[in-house]
Amino acid sequence: MDPVRTEIEGRVAVVTIDNPPVNALSAAVRAGLAAAIADAERGPAEAILILGAGRLFIGGADISEFGKPPVEPFLPDVIAAIEACPKPVVAAIHGTSLGGGLEVALGCHYRLAMPGTKLGLPEVTLGILPGSGGTQRTPRLTGLRAAAEMITGGRPVGAEAAREMGLIDRIGEGEVRTAGLAYAEELAGSAPRPTGGMAAPEAEDLSDLRKTLQARARGQVAPLVALEAVETSARLPFADGLAEERRLFHHLMETPQRAGLIHAFFAERAVAKVPGIKGVAPRDIGHVGIVGGGTMGSGIATAALLSGLRVTLVERDTDALDRARATIGKNLDAAEKRGKLKDRAAVEGALTLALDYDALSEADLAVEAVFEAMDVKREVFAALDAAMRPGAVLATNTSYLDVNEIAAATSRPADVIGLHFFSPAHVMKLLEVVVADETAPDVVATGFALAKRLGKIAVRAGVCDGFIGNRILSAYRAAADHMVLDGASPYQVDRAIRGFGFPMGPYQVSDLAGLDIGFMTRERKAATAHPKDRRPVFADALYHAGQLGRKAGRGYYDYSDDPKGREDPEVARIVAEAQEGQRAFTDEEIVRRYMAAMVNESARVVDEGIAARPLDVDVVLLHGYGFPRHRGGPMHWADAEGMDRILADIRAFAEEDDHFWRPAPLLERLVAEGRTFADLNTGGRA
Ligand code: 3H9
């Protein structure tokens, strides 16, 4: 079907863009739009109305065309033709209008948006900048600062805010087509009002915004380049500003950051396409049970309540229930402050607290979030099995235990699944959906449907110690610990890792999680440890000294007079005493070792089928472990860096420690065959 069609309604030519799912501006849409404007210009209509078919106006440029040879007509030229049209052109916007989609609207002479519409220029989140006039037309409508904030932040604004800023002229009523037609009829026969012909914005000092952007960039270039582009609008004539925008756009288009961010965008959508559950209907979930009201259980309860589900939380005694109620209350306070909670009374009314598993007899799904010990978990699952109705889903939030063994404690292993939330569960977006040997496909589909309902990104994981994320974490964490044992300071390691783009280094993460957690994990693994495994004795020493991290006021860092944490000479002394070597490391070597360990373990996780594809690993590390988004995730990064270089590093490191550094077979195969992880995202395992 033609992606752009024109109908004549009275004095108005109605041009509709119909390119599902998001009316992206593909080559065919651009050509169709250009032709429609040219035809309407020649025809009898006295005004032109541009609309989007379906649920939104235009989702932006077609991102899947990026990185491929460009196809004419180019979007800036199509928009220039709209702007130059001698008849008034009106955009009637509903749903969403993003990126190139908003730029089309800015090229129109008048803009109307329906209530609830989101309008934005999110290009910086893809590593680029608005490249079809957005950096020049927006400031002519809104002033320099508002445009700079919108474009460098990438966040959409609502219709009301857009009208206040001057970005749109009107808010429509009723149905978008009718509202747009009435507006166009009103303007029919009048002179066009090109945005590019408006006065340039007044120059303003934006150095404060530049400083803020620099402080939070962590290596990202697009926001600062976008600021530069917006600033030219106050200095240069319109045509020259457009040329400068184009030049900067093409520069960003060529950066690896653009490739990384767009990989992340598509990977986040691809994770939901799980092999084996295509077309499988999920079970209905309206009522969620939760066993355990600690930080995790209360966080999961909060997430479920905020998405309108009924929640029944079971704890052992009334004290524990009171604590859960208080934690959930605090979480809801925070959500209310952020505007995420409309009807508090209704949400609180949907929560039941109970001491008995019988309260879960009506629940559609229960999530167990109790102490991480197999015997405790098995007891809970036997009780759930007895209490829950047939067809209910029984989920465990374990972060490393064997879900098969947990399922075996019930008479219905097909209904058992792992739902591994990340703390705080009402904030973190990631959910690992852990599929055990006997988990039924519709139970897996239910895990994904629940994640969507909760606004989370679900990734399928197989059963192993730590699933995808924590298993890979334990490998790169070990690489960091080995460097400290050999002479690096934890502070240097943290700095180097932050320099790569992580928000925190591994020892800052330890302080946040609590050093007791790491200690307990080491104790748990000690029984099965290999004699050549190197134990981070400096971490044990800190644990025994009571330096448990943030909650104790001291861990690797001292938090007593600085909430961010100060380097601590006492820690440096404890670490130095426990160190096995005194070798110096450069920041570059620290990053190379850390990343080599991450990529190597990731390759094993993919090879063993624990992760369905490399892109699943990328999404887990991006959303659960702070991996810098502009690098796309460890697998995308490995491809960009060159897998042969990483394999050569691992082989070199193995010369001094061939126990820890063993190349993953998949890495060796891919290098030998000249293939990449990206090849496996589409083509399956090597
Ligand atoms: C730009 O415009 C550059 C210009 O300044 C200059 C150019 C010269 N292209 O997210 P969903 C696919 S940069 C291609 O699940 P929702 C998506 O992959 C662009 N495909 O839906 C998915 O495919 P599949 C600036 C796209 O309702 C399907 O559509 N624009 C695009 O939750 C459904 O997507 C943006 O950055 C695209 N632009 O949310 C907006 N967008 O079904 C990016 C989506 O095969 N898009 N797809 O997995 C979004 O933010 C959301 O998709 C949107 C709808 C809010 C529009």
Image: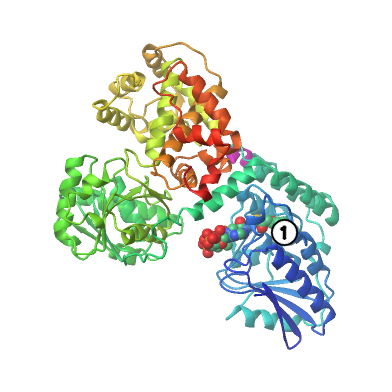
* Location of residue 516 in the rendering, given as x and y in whole percent from the top left corner: 30, 30
Magenta span dominant secondary structure: helix
Residue 557 in sight: no
Q: Is residue 242 above or below residue 219?
A: below
* Location of residue 651 in the rendering, given as x and y in whole percent from the top left corner: 50, 23
Q: Is 624 on the left or on the right of 313, as rendered?
A: right
* Rendering quadrant holding ligand 1: bottom right
Which residue is at the front of the view, 105 or 631? 631
Read off the residue under disc 1: 138
Q: Is 601 on the left or on the right of 250, as rendered?
A: left
Identify which residue is drawn at 50% across, 52% down: 268
Q: Is 223 on the left or on the right of 656, as rendered?
A: right
Q: Is residue 566 above or below residue 621?
A: above
Q: Which residues are magenta?
A: 212-217
Which residue is at the front of the view, 658 or 55? 658
Q: Quadrant of residue 484?
A: top left
